[in-house]
């Protein structure tokens, strides 16, 4: 069945098992999210990229279940279940009903969007106490992950491999990046990642590298009295392995993108007060520059798509990440 038919069905309030007054649709690069009055349903697009493969029904089923499993470790009961989208013999579709299964959905409780960290930062209403609460949630999560005793040896290989891909793609797309593109910045990132390799290995050995969130951004944090951190990455296990400080530093960089530079040092200080074993300034710089370059590459790579969504958005965003990388390197 065409994706458009599934999307049309899921935009109709009467399609849902629980009554809802409306359905709000949000589209991302890899999925559609349908927001009812009290639920959120995610439909993965049948797409294939170098870093994920949702092209087949079985793979979408697998990753829906994996998304539920991984996010229940961090977001608890917010992630409810993977539910099928079925089609009966007469052609009618249903969520969780009888008939031939034509796709899978991730069902979640709907979180209040006005409490998302990115919204609160833009409104200027985030407090240090709320940030400490976020770090407290992450601390408990990280300690649980450390107890699994899984060594993150793919982590250093991942950093080096992605660093080379960043350089190649940014160089190829430099016409879209204008003055923000800098060969010196690319070279500095590669040099830093090479120089800190031994320290990274030490941090792996001391279990500072864990299976983390994988994509920790302000829009994935809801500032309820007990903060909820959601949308943990599900499609690449290697991308989950990350130094706790690398992940929290990246969250701080995403806050810088929203104009909240003060958040990053506060997050790192709160993490150090709970966990200790902070990285050297050089390693933290390497992490920061690498994450900015990676995000710049992922943004500009949208223009490689056959029909890129919002094509004007990605060069602007990529340039912003490159400027932050230059600032971090200079500091």
Image (cartoon, grey):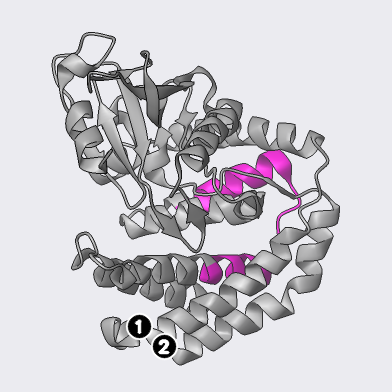
Q: Quadrant of residue 124?
A: top left
213 within the magenta span: no
Tell me the number on the disc at residue 188.
none
How far across and down, in percent of the image, does residue 289 sit?
Answer: 52, 71
Q: Alpha-carbon distance for marks 2 and 1?
A: 12 Å
State yes or no: discs 2 and 1 in contact (Cβ < 8 Å).
no
- Who's the residue at 51% across and 59% down the image? 51
Query: Looking at the image, can residue 316 be seen?
Result: yes
- On screen, residue 245 versus residue 80, left or right, reads right
Judge whether 46 appears above or below 104 on screen: below
Label 1 crowd (10 A; few <14 / some 14-19 / many >=20): some
- On screen, residue 199 versus residue 174, left or right, reads right
Tell me the number on the disc at residue 173.
1
How far across and down, in percent of the image, does residue 56 sit?
Answer: 45, 45
SS class, disc 2: loop
- The magenta span reads 264-290
């Amino acid at each position: 069945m065409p994706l458009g038919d599934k999307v049309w069905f899921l935009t109709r309030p009467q399609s849902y098992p629980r009554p809802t007054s409306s359905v709000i649709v949000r589209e991302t690069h890899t999925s559609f999210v349908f927001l009812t009055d009290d639920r959120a349903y995610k439909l993965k697009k049948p797409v294939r990229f170098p870093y994920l493969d949702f092209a087949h029904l079985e793979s979408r089923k697998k990753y829906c279940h994996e998304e539920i499993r991984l996010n229940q470790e961090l977001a608890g009961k917010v992630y409810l279940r993977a539910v099928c989208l079925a089609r009966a013999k007469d052609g009618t579709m249903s969520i969780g009903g009888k008939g031939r299964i034509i796709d899978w959905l991730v069902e979640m409780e709907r979180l209040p969007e006005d409490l998302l960290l990115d919204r609160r930062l833009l409104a200027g209403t985030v407090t240090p106490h709320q940030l400490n609460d976020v770090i407290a949630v992450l601390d408990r999560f990280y300690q649980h992950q450390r107890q699994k005793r899984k060594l993150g040896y793919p982590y250093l290989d991942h950093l080096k491999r992605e660093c080379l891909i960043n350089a190649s793609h940014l160089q190829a797309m430099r016409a879209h990046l204008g003055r923000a593109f800098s060969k010196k910045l690319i070279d500095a990132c590669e040099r830093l990642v090479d120089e800190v390799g031994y320290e990274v290995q030490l941090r792996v050995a001391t279990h500072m590298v864990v299976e983390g969130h994988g994509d920790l951004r302000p829009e994935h944090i809801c500032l309820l009295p007990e903060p909820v951190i959601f949308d943990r990455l599900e499609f690449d296990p290697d991308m989950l392995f990350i130094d706790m400080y690398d992940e929290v530093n990246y969250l701080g960089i995403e806050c810088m993108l929203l104009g909240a530079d003060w958040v990053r040092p506060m997050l790192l200080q709160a993490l150090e007060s709970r966990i200790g074993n902070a990285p050297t300034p050089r390693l933290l710089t390497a992490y920061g520059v690498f994450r900015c370059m990676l995000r710049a590459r992922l943004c500009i790579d949208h223009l490689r798509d056959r029909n890129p969504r919002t094509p004007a958005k990605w060069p602007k965003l990529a340039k912003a990440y490159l400027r932050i990388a230059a600032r971090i390197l200079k500091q």
